[in-house]
Each structure stands twice: as structure tokens, then as C-alpha cells.
Amino acid sequence: MLKKLADTIFKWYCHPDFYPDIKGDLEELYNDHVEEGSHFTQLRYLLDIMLLFRLSLLRPIFKNSIIKDTGMFRNYFKVSVRNLARHKMFTAINVIGLAIGLASFLLMYEYIKFEKSYDAFHPDSDKIYRVSNVRVQNGIDTDKDAMAAYPIGKILQETMPEIIQHTVSKKFDFLLVRNADKSFKERFAISADPNFLKMFNYPVLEGDVESMLSEPLSVVLTESRARAYFGDTDAMGKTLEIVSPYKASLKVTGILRDIPDNTHYSFNMLLSDKTLADGHDYNNWDWNNYYVYIKSNKVVDLRVLEAKANDVVNEHINDLDRDQDWKTNGTRIDVHPVQDIHLKSDFTYEPQIHGSEKAVDFLIIISVFILVIAWVNYINLSTARAVERAKEVGLRKVIGAIRKQLIVQFLCEAFLVNLISALIAIGLAELTLPYFNQLVGKEVLDSIWDQTPFLLAILAFVFIGTFASGFYPALVLSDFKPISVLKGKFQNSKKGIVLRKGLVIAQFAASLILIASTFTIYQQVNYMQGKDIGISVDQVVNVTVPEFDAETEDEQQAADSKLKAFKKVLANHSAVESVGGASNLPGGDVADINSTTTVVRIVGDTEPTEGTTYIQYNDEGFLNAVDMQLVAGRNFSEQMKSDSVAVMANEAFLRRLDVPDFNAVIGKKLQFGTKETNTKYTLVGVVKDYNRTTLKEQVEPSLYFPWFSADDLVIELKSDNYKAGLDHIKSTWEEFYGDSPLNYSFLDERFEALYDQDRSFGDTFMVFAILAVFIAILGLYGLASFMSIQKSKEIGVRKVLGASESQIIFLFYKDFFSLVGLSSLVGFPLIYFLMNGWLDNYAYRISFPWGLLGMSLLIVLVFSLFTVGYQTLKVAKLDPAKTLKYE
């Protein structure tokens, strides 16, 4: 790709008479390098093309240009190269800063582009929408559920002519899959109707899209999962056994290419939904457990489409001849563009953890900061050196140079700096790409060299950077009056000094924002990980027991007895504190729990109350295993037959029902729906609130129902002997369930995984904030160095008159103290506005950390004073006789 870019550039500028011969020589040289196995052959080829950019080889289109007419084109570059070589330190500062800035900006840009590209790879993705449920109370959206009822898509397609296709899918928590002697706990399994692969059009390697999901007991695998299950043998037509939570033999009817990372709905295994038809009511409008997608025949106005869809659904609901909570519960449907789900969704029950548009916006800001700071360094150093370049400009004007030619001269210099920086940036980006992918937690790019857009962006930024960083200095330098300059009366203009100070203030303000933001992000992440969530998950192990469909009551009793015996043996060990079981484990994401939107009430005490109620089933040992506290009433008891219709509630649930005294409702009846004949459950206990999922979410109003055969076990081990406890779990598993693989995990690791994305964002922000501050300090170092050299004679005079080194350094510090002070006035309000807004994304957040503002200011001051003081001290130590001997 790089070679193709180089060929395009060469053909653009090379004279047609010379092009064929030179092109042939270049190709021959390139092929020799390839055969020798040389590294970076394409980069060497591009460098050869750049070095051939000579006056004698230009095509006729340049004949009438100002460069060709003056005959100074070669001179411009020669003078630029000499000037850059003469001032090595300033050249190095500019090149290093621009290279790091450009590499950082472009890598960050690729990540941002990746985040914004979710689901854009689907054909007609701008016409695909997801239909979801939203609860409305008093005209305000309350609970927003990403899932919806199965029939909605079909009704919309049948009723609305603009809807040309729909599909419905369901996500499994997990499937226990067996193939011969291999067993897998498949956590990325979904089911879907035959339209799914037609709408989303994932690349098919084997099988027929029209039929691969049309029959029951069909399964489609991704390429990597097919290889995991069947090795290198052909998977088509082979059979996989599902042993839990369903029992079925599935035939492989298709193989897909691995699903791209940039999708909101990833999967490795796709079952036909007809496989599950016996256990699911696909006409049920109350069961919102499906992801429903529709496709329009054209890009439509979203508000119009949503309003029309709601009218259609409400009309259909009103026609249903049965009790229906849709209207009474204030439910509407939301139509969401599929491309917006990853960054803009604020729905619960998303199929996977989604991104944050605010986080991406923050990264856009920091990437722009980095690049602008690097360009500011160039502008500052170039304009600061105005006195030094003044005589050069004066002499050029005396011998006939016009201002336009001088501007071209200085732009050529800026072009060389940006070009060299760009070439170094390419190398930096390629070298750091694996670490960058690891930092952001996603494989954004495999390699730089095969990314033509990336390389074209580098080339574009060479020209953008040339004008952004070089145009103002070129205007300033070319405007000098030769008479004043050659008489020695030239001084830096006040405008130039004000501009430089303004740019330094901007750099300091940007550094303050980045440092304070980094501290705030890390403090929030640490707060979430360290906050008391209301239960104890340390040394708590999860083990999932295989679930088999029992065909008879005797088989079910045998399975239950085996599970009880297993739990009893587990608990009968000195390293095991307690054993419990539940349907849903703490530490899951927002979708990893059951829920209902049916109205609920405490009979005789509260009115039917709307809202989403989260439901968990657990045995009597669960509370002890995770140290969940009772605040009223009692725990479940398997010995009490009446507990078959018992229920426990958390504090958040009772607060939603406006129950002030929790003890007063113990023993009362709780009922779902509005029918008097609906089951009434006895409220036997109230448990303390705990954060089941990430602290971005509020504690969920939850109900707990008894299930004494829960198959997700939580085993609390004693911290001083947990290794013996793990060994006991393994040996007991072999005794009871040795024919199935043992999969165990620690609950604290589940909670930590919830914050992977926040940690990744914090790490990414920190690394690029450090780079931005480093570039700013680099520029400040160059500026302080130049200013101290410029004022060496003044310093010499002051020393002769008796000034000490500390007094001289303090004189320099005064200017920078004022600049840092002004930068804080600019930066502090921006920090508060940006970070307070970011913290508002979290239900549980730290207070705005005012103390971090002072810490950030102190860090900027220390770096600045050290940088300025080091340069000033070097000049202050010089013997005045040396600095003043020519005066």
C-alpha cells in the first residue's frame, strides 16, 4: 500500500520523458530489496521517491510557478536543511514533538474511528433499527429495556410498508456444549430466526443462508469455534450436544467468518429459534426477552418512524382479547439506529457492555490537544528566534527577494520538519501498535503498512501541519523591515511576545486539564472497585452444576438428590465456610438477571406500582455464602413447605413502593398484575441493598424467590486455607460430575471484569496525557533555552552589578509564575465542567476532587520551574567576561 502511494506521488510530479526509465530503475531496485529480505522495503521506496523530487525532474506544469521562475527552489531547501542542521537542539525538539504528536493523534484517531464504526459493516446498516421497550411514568422515560416481545417485528413488517424485513434473536447466559470428549461452556451463544443472516449478512464460509437456520436443531458456528470443536476436520453436518440448560443434539448447517469486534451483538454459536419453539410462546406480548430488529426500504426520519410504530403496536394491543399490561403500565417502543447502539445506548439488558460516547469525545479532545501542543511548540520556537533570523531576511530583501518568496522559504523549512516528523511518526506508530491495541483492549489495526487511509492521513497532515505550524512564523519573519534590521534597531514585536505568552498559557491550561482529568478518572475507578457493595465476594467461588432435562419426576428427584448430596459434601470440609446456590450471580452485567415489567403491589398496603422488578431465585445458603444481610424477617427454609410461595425483597424494592417500615410488611402478601386471582407470595424477609453490577447503575429493585435446586453454586472458602478448599471442590466434582468439565471462577474477579472498560479508558487517557504534557514540557525547554541564551548579555550585566544566581533565576521565574497562574484561571473552570459531566455518568461517584486541582497545578509548576530553572542556571553560571567581551 505504501509503494502504491509512492508511485502515485512520483507519477504526479515526474516529467513524462523521464518517468518510464526512472520508474523501471526504481522497480528493479525495489525487487532486489524484496529478494534480499530487507526490512521496510516500502518505506525505503517512498524515501527514494521523495529524494527524487528535484527541479530538473519536474513535469512542465511547474514551469510557470513562482518556484520555477525565481530559480530558488533548490536554494530554499538547501537553506532550510542548513538552518535545521545548524540548530540541532531546536530541530530535535520540533521533530520529536511533532512525531510523537502525530503518531499519537493518528493512533487515537484510528481507535475513535473504530469505536464509531460499530455495525457499519452491515449492508444498508443506516436502514437497520432495533425495537426496544421503554417504561413511561408521567410522560418521563423511566426503565429502558433493550429487549422487546417476539411478535413486534412481524406486526410492524406486516402493517408498515416501509418496513421490508425483520428478525428476532435471543441471547443465552451460557450453553454447556459437548463434542465427543470435549466440553465447553459457551458464553457467546444466541438463537435467531432465518431472517437474521439475511438482514445482517455476515460473511458465510460454508452453508446456504436461505436454509441454514430454517430447520429445528440447526446450529451455525463461527470459523474459530468450529475449529475449537472439530479441529481441522470439516464441521459441516457434524453434531454437537447441548447438555445445559437445554438438552439437544444440533447439526452444524453453516460456518461464518469470525464476527468482527466492532459489533454490538457478538456471538460464536447461532441456533435456529425453531429449536426452542416448544419451550417458548412466540406470540406472547408480555415476554420481553428478545432482540428485535427491523429494516426500512430507505433512510427515514426516526421520529416519524417511531411514532408510527407505536401507533401500530398500540392498535394491535387494544385488539387483543386478553388481560394486557402494555397500556396500563405506560409502555412504549423505542426505535434505535443499529449504528448508534454501541456508543449512544442508555438501555438495560444490552447484549454486551457498550461503549461511551462521552469517553470517545474525551479521547478526541486529548488527541487534538497533543497535536496542537506540538504545533504550538514549532510556532513558539520559530517566532522566538525572530531576532536571529532578522538579518537573514534583511539581506534577502536587500538583494531583491520579495515577501512571497520569503514566505515560501520558511514554509519549505516547516515542510521539511513536518515531513521528517511524519516519517518518524509512521515508524513510531508501527512499533507501538501492539501495545496500543493492548492498551485500548481491542485490535484496532493489525499493521500500519496495509492501511492506505492511515498513510494518506499521514501525508495529509504533513501539508496541514506545514501551514498550521509554519504559516504564522513565515508571515512574521517575512515582514521585517530591512533598514531597521541592518541598522541593528530590530526588536521582537509586542504582538509576537503576547502571542507566545498566549500559546504558553494555552499549553499550561491543556496540561492542567489532562493531569487533573487523569487523576479524577483513576480516583473514580478506584472508588468503584473499593466501595463496599453490600456483600462479601472475597474467596467466594462459583461452580455451575450441569443441568439435565429430566423426562420423568423420578429422574428430576434423582438429580435434585444428587445436587443436595454434592452441596453437603462440599460444605463438610474445614476449608469451606458455606455453600449456596442462585439463578444469577453477583458481578454480572446489567443483562445478567431476570426481570419483569408487570405492576406489583403489597396487598392491602400499596397500590399497583409500575417499574422494572429484577428477580433472582436462590436457596437458603446463598445469603450466608455472600454475607448478604437481613434487615427484617427471615431467610428461606427448605423445611417449611409454605416457603414454596415465599419471597424476599431488597430495600430498594420497598422504597419504590413507598414502604416506610420494613418490619410492618413482613408476612404480608405480594402480588403481580391486576387480577385478584394472580398468585400471592408471602413476604418473609427484607435484605440489605447491594450493588449486583457496576456502580454506574443504581441498586436494582429486586425480589428473591426460593429455588432449592439452584445450579449456580457459590462456595465461600476460608481465606487462610482457600487452596485446600479448591482442591476439595475439584475432588468432589470428580466424584459427582466427573463426566462434565469443571468450570469455576471467583466472584471478585467477576466484579473486577465489570470495570475493564473503565480501567482501559483510564490507562489510555493517562498514557496520552503524559505524552501531551511531555511535548508541552519539551517545547517549554526549547523556549526557555532560547530565551536564556538571548538574555545572556543581560544576565552578564546583572552579575557584574552584583546580582546572585538565585536572583537571576527568580527574574525568569516571575514571568512563568504569571503564565501558570493565568493558565489555571483558564483551565480550572474547564476541568470542572468536563470532569463533573463525566462523573455524572455514574450512579455512585466521587465528589468533585477540588484537591486534585491544586495537585495538578503543583505538578505543572514543578515541571515548569525545573525546566526554566535548569536552562537559566546554565547561563547564570557563565563568566560575565565571556558574555560581555564583545560589548
Image (cartoon, helix red, strand yellow):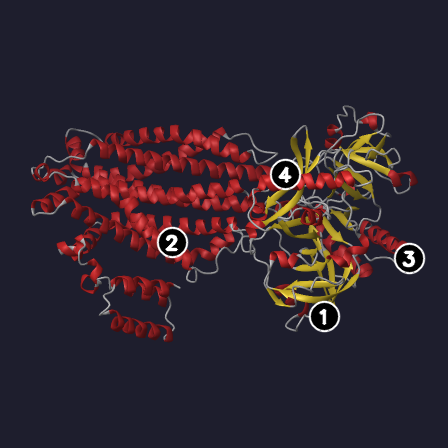
What residue is rendered at 27% in x and 42% in y? Answer: 379
- Considering the image in quadrants, where does the N terminus appear? bottom left
Q: Nearer the viewer, mark 4 or mark 2?
A: 4
C-alpha separation, residue under disc 2 versus residue under disc 3: 67 Å
Q: Nearer the viewer, mark 4 or mark 1?
A: 4
Q: Earlier in the sequence, mark 2 or mark 1?
A: 1
Q: Which mark is residue 214?
A: none
The residue identified by callout 4 is: 307
* Amino acid, disc 3: Thr
Q: Nearer the viewer, mark 4 or mark 3?
A: 4
The kind of secondary structure element at disc 1 is: loop
771, above or below 744, in the image? above
Q: Earlier in the sequence, mark 2 or mark 3?
A: 2
C-alpha separation, residue under disc 3 versus residue under disc 1: 29 Å
* Amino acid, disc 1: Lys
Q: Earlier in the sequence, mark 4 or mark 2?
A: 4
The residue identified by callout 2 is: 457
Q: Quadrant of residue 652?
A: top right
Q: Nearer the viewer, mark 2 or mark 3?
A: 2
What residue is rendered at 17% in x and 33% in y? Answer: 794
Q: Position of residue 765 (x, y in %)?
A: 47, 44
Of 410 and 846, nearer the camera is 410
**Image marks 4 and 3: residues in contact by CB distance under 8 Å:** no
* Amino acid, disc 4: Ala
The residue identified by callout 3 is: 552
Q: Nearer the viewer, mark 3 or mark 1?
A: 1
C-alpha separation, residue under disc 2 versus residue under disc 1: 47 Å
